[in-house]
Amino acid sequence: MVDMNSLSQALQKGDRNTVVELVKAALAEKAPAKKILEEGLIAGMSVIGDKFKKNEVYVPEVLIAARAMHGGLEILEPILAKAGVEPVGRVVLGTVKGDLHDIGKNLVGMMLRGGGFQVLDLGTDVAPEKFVEGAKKSGKCIVAMSALLTTTMPQMTGVVKALKAAGVTEAKTLVGGAPVTQKFADEIGADGYAPDAASAVDRAKELAGK
Ligand code: B12
């Protein structure tokens, strides 16, 4: 029997090959895909998330663990989709208009996927209307915005306003990026702020009501 803890451990070490092998072996033993996802992959990624918050691991370790996670998810996703397993929530993610920084955004996206969210990544330099379009497509979702420049932070205000103007009331907004603060989030009327990728998952879960 494949032990979910060894799968979690392999993910934490960033050992993609072992993760892929163990996921395949667990499926061959008829372990439910949801269990493999929750007790193996998501459990491992949340350990990495906690360590990242405490500065016990750094960006490269998170990226390697996320790559291993991705290996496992590729195998599980079609099975989960067929079984109709609902994601924890949907996130429309992007770096705001005029801003090309995407390392932090990508990390946030990886951790959110690791937390069981379905992520629509719109990339960088995303105009408010693109966020609105993505949110309309996704229905009940979280619009997550990243900004690394003080000059592009005001774009977040634009997105919050554009969502309201378009009547997209089902979408919550989450903001982050090095210059962004809780105070700024409050000022622009965003629903949430998180200082790092691991906390982003906690906030997103709160916003999704999970
Ligand atoms: C790498 C980098 C670049 C790369 C970007 C490559 C890429 N693909 O991303 C390049 C070289 C392209 C670049 C360009 C520029 N850069 Co630059 N860049 C950086 C640098 C060194 C690191 C940013 C980074 O990736 N950090 C690592 C990640 C993991 O951290 P992070 O982004 O903060 O993300 C974390 C959190 O903030 C949070 N988070 C991030 N997004 C989100 C979103 C949500 C929803 C949530 C909840 C959380 C969250 O979680 C992440 C993970 O924990 C910073 C300096 C710094 N130390 O921050 C400057 C910096 C951001 N850049 C700066 C500048 C000025 C520029 C340029 C204008 C330079 C120029 N004159 O051309 C251009 C602008 C280009 C543009 N239009 O965007 C300034 C910004 C100053 C300011 N206050 O506005 C900085 C601070 C450097 C400095 N000290 O002057 N840059």
Image (spheres, rainbow, N blue to C red):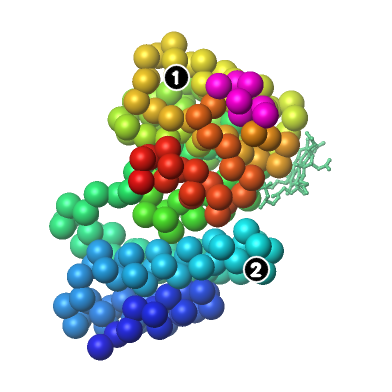
On the image, the x and y values in percent for residue 67 come to: 49, 66
Q: Is residue 93 above or below residue 36?
A: above
Of residues 208 and 23, which is closer to you in this image?
208
User: Which numbered dot is residue 57?
Assistant: 2
Task: Relative to 109, say whether 157 is above or below.
Answer: above
Where does the image place residue 206, in percent across and percent down from the top left? Answer: 43, 42
* 84 relative position to 61: left or right: left
Q: How many marks?
A: 2
* Disc 2 versus disc 1: nearer the observer: 2
Magenta span: predominant SS is: helix
Position of 31 relative to 180 (above/below):
below
Which residue is denoted by mark 1 in the rendering?
163
Tell me what residue is drawn at x 36 percent, y 72 percent. 40
Q: Is residue 187 magenta?
A: yes
Q: Is the residue 129 above or below the residue 172 in the image?
A: above
Q: Which residues are drawn in magenta? A: 183-189
Tell me the quadrant of ligand 1.
top right
